[in-house]
Image (spheres, helix red, strand yellow):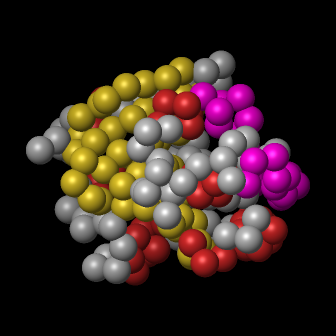
Amino acid sequence: MRIIAGSKRRLPLKTIEGKDTRPTTDRIKETLFNMIQNEIPGSYFLDLFSGSGQIGLEALSRGSLYSVFVENNKKAAACIAENIRFTKSEKESLLLQMDVLPAMRSMEGKHKFDIIFMDPPYGKLLEQEVLEYLQNSSLLKEDALIIVEMALGTDYSYVKDLGYQILKEKQYKTNMHVFLTKEN
């Protein structure tokens, strides 16, 4: 696993052993960042269920001003901290080792994000909990982009009822990215 493009291009990243995280493959990561490349420069990026931190670090490498990483797994958070240090991204990063909902509550009034990326454990409806929370949150800037990584076949028909507009969807072999924004 590595940073694909930008100022920190080709730097290798660590990930934890085992099945506690599912690192996004370089190919899927490259496709994702090609799709959002114009939104990244100058953005504030929130990486939820961060795993190794590779998505938020890729955003920083490509011109994001600041990335916040939220990960409750102790080993994964230690891995993110190590990757942040290795890529010399300490000044433009914040790591919160805690559950996602309390982490978002702790950031209210302190941070506003242009892009929120989440890759929660599949099949636990955690993405729905996060989207429900974000409905009335001050964490989103106007026209913020929310990207949800989920297993193929995951039902997300509820997002319109929560006040989100589906901008696009990209399917891969076993998972997909759904791109959302709040309806005005």
Q: Position of residue 28 (x, y in %)?
A: 65, 30
Q: Residue at x 55, y 31 (%)?
A: 34
Quarter holding residue 81? bottom right
For residue 79: magenta?
no
In the picture, measured across the screen, residue 168 lies left or right of residue 92, that is: left
In the picture, measured across the screen, residue 109 lies left or right of residue 60, that is: left
Q: Nearer the viewer, residue 110 or 62?
A: 62
In the picture, measured across the screen, residue 143 lies left or right of residue 14, that is: left
Q: Which residues are magenta?
A: 8-31
For residue 18: magenta?
yes
Residue 37 visible at all:
yes
Q: Main secondary structure of the magenta part?
A: loop
- Quarter holding the C terminus is top left
Q: Residue at x 65, y 33 (%)?
A: 30
Residue 124 sits above or below residue 96 on the image: above
Quarter holding residue 50? bottom right
Q: Position of residue 176 (x, y in %)?
A: 54, 28
Residue 22 sits above or below residue 46 on the image: above
- Quarter holding the N terminus is top right
Q: Residue at x 37, y 61 (%)?
A: 113
Q: Nearer the viewer, residue 153 or 51?
A: 51
In the picture, measured across the screen, residue 135 lies left or right of residue 89, that is: left
